[in-house]
């Protein structure tokens, strides 16, 4: 695991690991089910990712989309590769919702819909809710 994965809570927030990629729950839930997809190769630019990791990316993104669709029936999904602070290749994966969703008695709105996601937004999660969300998403992964 690299520094970016650790920063985003690996291994506690890990949903899945496939090939060169690790899927983590994003600590700041901009939208319900927001994730971080981290490449485990020691590269700092997307063009440096190996051919095998690119091949793995197809399967892991398919898995993410199936999981999030099962879990929360998202309307759209955004993959953002910002890489301004954390040096390792990674994406922020944001499921998008036209209508608010419920989880663990909390309401999660997508205030940016249908425009770009509001990255400053955050649905605070207590430790128990975060653990339940990680467990729920792991159970939806195939």
Image (spheres, rainbow, N blue to C red):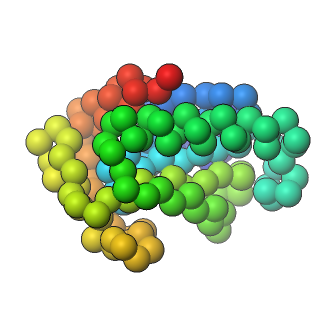
How many tags in the picture?
A: 0
- Residue 36 visible in the displayed image: yes
**Residue 28: percent from the left, percent from the top?**
38, 54
Q: Is residue 28 visible?
A: no
Using the image, determine if residue 11 lies above or below residue 43. Answer: above
Q: Assign the N terminus to one quadrant of the image.
A: top right
Q: Quadrant of residue 136?
A: top left
Name the residue located 71 percent from the left edge and 51 percent from the top edge: 88
Q: Is residue 104 left or right of residue 4?
A: left
Pinpoint residue 98: horizontal percent, then vertical percent. 28, 63
Front residue of this view, candidates 29 and 53: 53
* Location of residue 132 (image quadrant): top left
User: Between 26 and 66, which is closer to the camera in this rendering?
Assistant: 66
Residue at the limit of the structure toward the bottom, as seen here: 115
In the displayed structure, would residue 1 be above or below residue 85?
above
Q: On the rendered structure, is 136 left or right of 16?
A: left
Q: Nearer the viewer, residue 120 or 104?
A: 104
Q: Position of residue 100 (x, y in %)?
A: 21, 58
- Identify the residue at image location x=41%, y=69%: 117
Position of residue 31 measured from the top left corner of the image (x, y, whole percent): 34, 56
The residue depicted at 24 percent of the width and 37 percent of the height is: 129
Residue at (22%, 60%) from the top-left corner? 99
């Amino acid at each position: 695991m690299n520094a970016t994965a650790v920063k985003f809570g690996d291994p506690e927030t890990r949903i899945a690991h496939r090939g060169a990629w690790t899927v983590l729950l994003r600590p700041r839930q901009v939208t319900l089910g927001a994730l971080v997809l981290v490449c485990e190769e020691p590269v700092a630019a997307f063009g440096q990712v190996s051919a095998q990791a690119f091949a793995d990316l197809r399967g892991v993104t398919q898995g993410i989309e199936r999981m999030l669709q099962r879990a929360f029936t998202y309307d759209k999904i955004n993959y953002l590769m910002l890489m301004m602070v954390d040096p390792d290749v990674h994406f922020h994966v944001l499921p998008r919702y036209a209508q608010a969703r419920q989880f663990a008695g909390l309401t999660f709105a997508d205030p940016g819909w249908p425009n770009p996601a509001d990255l400053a937004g955050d649905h605070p999660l207590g430790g128990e809710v975060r653990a339940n969300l990680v467990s729920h998403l792991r159970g939806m992964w195939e």
